[in-house]
Amino acid sequence: MTAMTLATAGAPAASAIELDEVCLGWRDKMAVRDLSGCFRKGSLTAVVGPNGAGKSTLLRGIMGWVSPMAGRIRVSSGSGSQLAFMPQKGDFDSSFPISARDFVAMGSWRRVGPWRRYRREELERLENSLQAVGLGDFGRRPISTLSGGQLQRALFARLMLHDADTYMLDEPFSALDRATTEDLMGLLMEWNERGKTIIVVLHDLELVKRHFPETLLLAGQGVAWGKTQDVLTPENLHLARHLCAGDYR
Amino acid sequence: MIGLDMLWEPFFEFSFMRRALAGSLALALAAGPLGVFLILRRMSLMGDAMAHAILPGVAVGFLTAGLSVTAMTIGGIVTGLLVALLAAAVARLTPQREDASFAAFYLVSLGVGVLLISLRGSNMELIHVLFGSVLALDDSALMLVSSSSSVTLLALALIYRPLVMECMDPLFLRSESRMGPVVHASFLLLLVLTLVSGFQVLGTLMVVGIMMLPAAAARFWAGSAIGQMALAAVGGVLASYAGLLLSYYANVPASPAIILCAGIVYFVSVTFGVHGGLWLVARQARARSLRLSRIPERE
């Protein structure tokens, strides 16, 4: 735990999300224990760990959908500060009869709400985000006819339209080919350069090493948190596997 | 003599037929769109469960005030919502899944309801509650079904955007607003309201049919949620009209005749529908095998 505080203490920028001895879980099963640290404003962090390490639970805790059993989660409340969440593939109904454009248009919710109409400016934003993810010609297609990669692009377009300060993505690249992954990763880096805080749950450690400056390694508790090359050491990864396997015994 | 005027003559001639038509059309217009959302939310059996859940309340209303529309309606709404809340609570507090707890509660409700009505009523009255009295709608029943349908359609329009979001991506709605539970509860309320008013027309057992069959059929014709809702309403209207004619000329009970016609609408749609209907699928399969057979085989 000391290594984690050291790594984050060196960062001068303000924190977007602060965790203080946080314990999270469902019913009587604790998924994340005593996690402390912070996601800096404008940081690009990968959250990695074995299955059952509590990665998705952590994101849900930050969103406020799971309240901590102990400890505190502070989300900085700067001007218009918001969190946007991108669900995993199985979390939404991809056979729903809705066009790709209407699906992406959900991202405008903060500005249009349940009743206001989409003004020209909003429709332009919508077109722009469809273009940006390469779905410019697919707006009218029902989402059930989109390929896995196109569907993921639509999710990214919706996130882009949302225009929040902090983006949290739960396994956005699972089952995607390399080209699509690189495309979408490029978008994430572009958003990050524009000052967005981005937190991504991931499995592909090579991708993490290539693109993510910071990493949080979870295994039911924080194993390490800081610069990616300091976190993804063979010893840490071994420890993480060991901790998670111990849970099932 | 068989003539075109057979299509409207019963409605000109008899006021009970006009009332039956008005009542069943009003019901069909609201029930179809609700059914579409039940199917989209994968809660097709929920309509069934709720229709049974209103029965004990209807029975208590009947026991205290006889066949009074107001008493039976209030009772039905109360137990319908109570069962929905209890089933949801059991699903949340125990490992039992929601569909199973709903099934348990509605089966109990059905038993309690039938038992309560039998305590005081005759078999005729039991049949009236279970199968409705579309050919004997009085003013208060007609008022109830038409106003509940109007309220339902207006409310659906009002909550349409968040309702679609809640159906297809509940996590997203949850990250954006706290409306999720409100929208879900309003939807259940509209469902109970429509079922309670619909039971006056078609009875508790048959009212689910006019909700689910046209909605299930609409899926084969329209690719958008709005299109499916409109078509479900149209399908329900056609089935009601045709069913009443069938009942008049063949001298059979009206509400099963209406559901039978809705069933025909459904089977025609499954067979000939342009979105995945059997005919289309078979033709595509044949075209595919023809194409493949034209590819010359390698020596």
Image: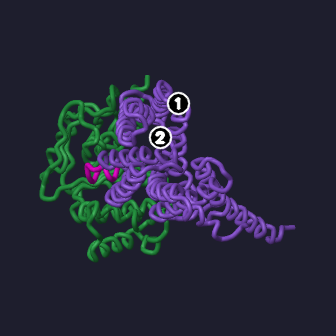
| Chain seen in green | A
Q: Is residue A124 left or right of residue B232?
A: left
Range of residues picked out in magenta: B171-179
Chain B colour as displayed: purple
User: Which quarter of the figure is the C terminus of chain B placed in?
Assistant: bottom right
Residue at the spot x=44%, y=56% of the render?
B30
Q: Tell me the CA gap for discs 1 and 2.
A: 21 Å
Q: Main secondary structure of the magenta part?
A: helix
The chain under label 2 reads B
**Label number found at residue B122:** 1
Mark closer to the chain start, 1 or 2: 2
Return the residue nearer the eye: B223 or B195: B195
Residue at the spot x=24%, y=64% of the render?
A111
For the residue marked with disc 2, what is the amino acid?
A: Ala
Is residue B178 shown above or below A121? above
Q: Is residue B265 left or right of residue B134?
A: right
Residue B36: where, in percent of width, then height? 48, 54
For the residue marked with disc 1, what is the amino acid?
A: Ser
Instruction: Return the residue at label 2.
Output: B51
SS for callout 2: helix
**Label number found at residue B217:** none
Nearer to us of marks 1 and 2 is: 1
Question: Is B174 colored magenta in this rendering?
Answer: yes
The reply to whether callout 1 and callout 2 are in contact (CB within 8 Å) is no
Q: Residue furthest right?
A: B299
Q: Is residue A126 left or right of residue B67?
A: left
Residue at the spot x=63%, y=53% of the render?
B247
Residue B225: where, in percent of width, then height? 46, 61
Q: Residues within 10 Å of mark 1 (few under 14, many from 20)?
A: few
SS for callout 1: loop
Return the residue nearer the eye: B229 or B237: B237
